[in-house]
Image (cartoon, rainbow, N blue to C red):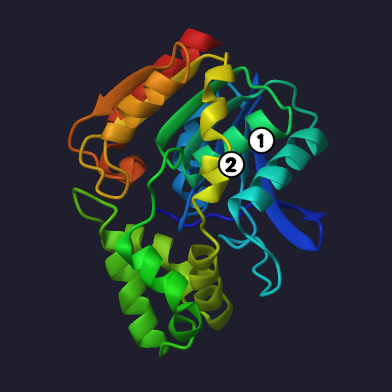
Amino acid sequence: MTNHDLGRTLRWEGRTVSWDRLGAGPALVFLHGTPWSSALWRPYAEALAARFTVHLWDMPGYGTSSKADDHRVDLETQGALFAHLLDVWDLDKPHVIAHDFGGAVALRTRLLHGHRYASLCLIDVVALRPWGSPFFRLVQQHSDVFEQLPPAVHRGAVEAYIRGASHRGLRDDELEMLVRPWTDARGQAAFYRQIAQADEKYTEEIEPLYGAIDEPTHIIWGTEDTWIPVDRAHRLAASIPHATPTLIPGAGHLIQLDAPAQLSAELIRWREAVR
């Protein structure tokens, strides 16, 4: 997988947000999760740019967006920023595709900030408690210690953590693309900061509101996701009226890399169905 740069930036509450726009057609926005960036969505964005105007962005604290020590990167902050981006981009009811905690960001923006979507596709998302691994809880208790790990030890920990998100295993270039943003001093601090600020209260706040979602909603899940087990797909589908679930066999949490052909086909099928 090749590296990529987002070609545009904007400022929001002291943060620099990297973003880009591709293609032409109805608006479509991708949201990444943690500890990922828009790089994970880039091949899919380029494929769908033949049919849609696709928006990609790196959340503050991730990818090529700013990683200042004093800036919050929690789900509340990212949801408020996404609402702002939709206003700046002048997007009225875009299609939205979200992965991991990008799902919680999209849901918070929909339910707490008054934005609506043409459709919503939720892929192995953070949306229902409980979430967060034992590693998350360990870092939350000792984030200041983890931020001081020797670089080689830190890189080893990040690599092991990220490898656990894939069921089929990652190629060296894929692993490097995912690990690289976290390997310098600023990236190391940002990696543990975003884990320390993860809090189930941000999904607890919106879970009772899922029944109000009336947009076409599709849920895609890898059957071998060990980060967010597949039972969440069924629970989430039952919580959102008329939501349709699709399970992809043999895919882990990094479904974009574990099952690219199957995911691409499902996204195209869903997008054509709701276009």
Give the side of residue 224 with respect to residue 90, left or right: left
Name the residue type under label 1.
Thr
Q: Nearer the viewer, residue 246 or 133?
A: 133
**Structural crowding at the residue carrying mark 1, measured as other residues with C-alpha within 10 Å and reported as few (<14), some (14–19) or many (≥20):** many
**Structural crowding at the residue carrying mark 2, measured as other residues with C-alpha within 10 Å and reported as few (<14), some (14–19) or many (≥20):** many
Give the side of residue 260 with respect to residue 6, left or right: left
Q: Vertically, is 219 above or below 56?
A: above
Image location (x, y in percent) of residue 214: 57, 13
Q: Nearer the viewer, residue 82 or 174?
A: 82
Residue position for label 2: 105
Question: Can I make out residue 236 in this image?
Answer: yes
Q: Are marks 1 and 2 in contact (CB under 8 Å)?
A: yes
**Residue drawn 41% across the image and 90% down it:** 150
Distance of label 1 from label 2 (alpha carbons)? 6 Å
**Residue drawn 36% across the image and 86% down it:** 152
Q: Vertically, is 49 above or below 4?
A: above
Image location (x, y in percent) of residue 228: 32, 44
Q: Quadrant of residue 119?
A: top right
Image location (x, y in percent) of residue 200: 49, 50
Q: Which mark is residue 109?
A: 1
Q: Nearer the viewer, residue 73 or 165?
A: 73
Q: Vertically, is 273 above or below 68?
A: above
